[in-house]
Image: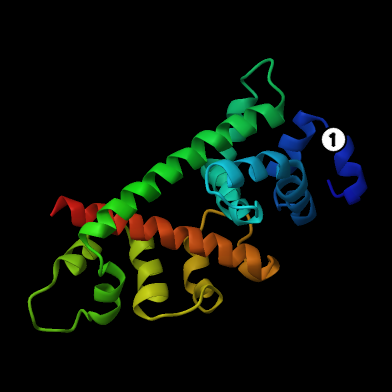
Amino acid sequence: MSMRPDKYVELSDDEWITLLMVTPPEERAHRYFFEVKCRTFLQYIASTIFGSDDSRELIGDFYQFLSQDDWHVLRLYKKRNGASLGSYLSRCAVHHFMAIKKREQESRDISMEHPDIIKELSLFTQDEESEQPPVWEAFSRLSERDQLILRHIVIEGKSALEAADAIWPHVKSDNKDWRTLSPKRVQDTISMLKKRALLALSLELKKQ
């Protein structure tokens, strides 16, 4: 279902849902949807929740949110009546990013208790015979994906694009080859995953 970008403006809500979930994905349609149709409420969220004037910073995270579990959020919309797709997604986005903001605040609070999390993790090696520090014990309890992300980005100090080959297979995305996407989108997605992995690490540390 490929079409010219100027035709996207004419699509109904149901047509958009079908187009977004089509396999293989239509990259131009996704780009138009997230960068144009979602721009207004993402700009509002960026400004009011995060104090930023750049809504593009939220696109990677919002894409992950919508596409996870085979576009579960969009499938739920089909069961609703009354609200437009834009109104529905704007409410979902506000709740989603408010939850992220809350977790970020919790992460900062935890980081104040453990100010050297990244430094300790980047300096410590699993081969050392000395007793494991709390940060490494917490690291060992993380999911495979969070460990992989932190190992490549924090411990080995790679950039998002340098680590993309290893990380992208663990990303929930319709685009299996990260090279087909813009570098900015790949960087934003991996940066978001890194933040989530660090938050998970912080929460594990709090349990100790």
Towards the viewer: 128 or 180: 128
Residue pictured at 16% horizontal, 50% vertical: 207
Image side of residue 68 versus residue 144, left or right: right
Residue 136 sits in quarter: bottom left
Q: Report the coloring of the rendering.
A: rainbow
Q: Position of residue 185 (x, y in %)?
A: 63, 62
Rendered location of residue 183, percent (x, y): 65, 70
* Residue 84, x across and y down, in percent: 72, 24
**Residue sitting at the far top:** 82
Q: Residue at x 13, y 71 (%)?
A: 133
Closer to the camera in the image, 21 or 87: 87
Residue carrying label 1: 11
The structure residue drawn at horizontal position 68% and vertical position 20%, both measured from the top left corner, is: 83
Is any atom of residue 25 visible in this view?
yes
Q: Which residue is at the front of the view, 170 or 84?
A: 84
- Give the amino acid at mark 1: Leu
Total marks in image: 1
Dot 1 crowding, Cα within 10 Å, few <14, some 14–19, many 20+: few
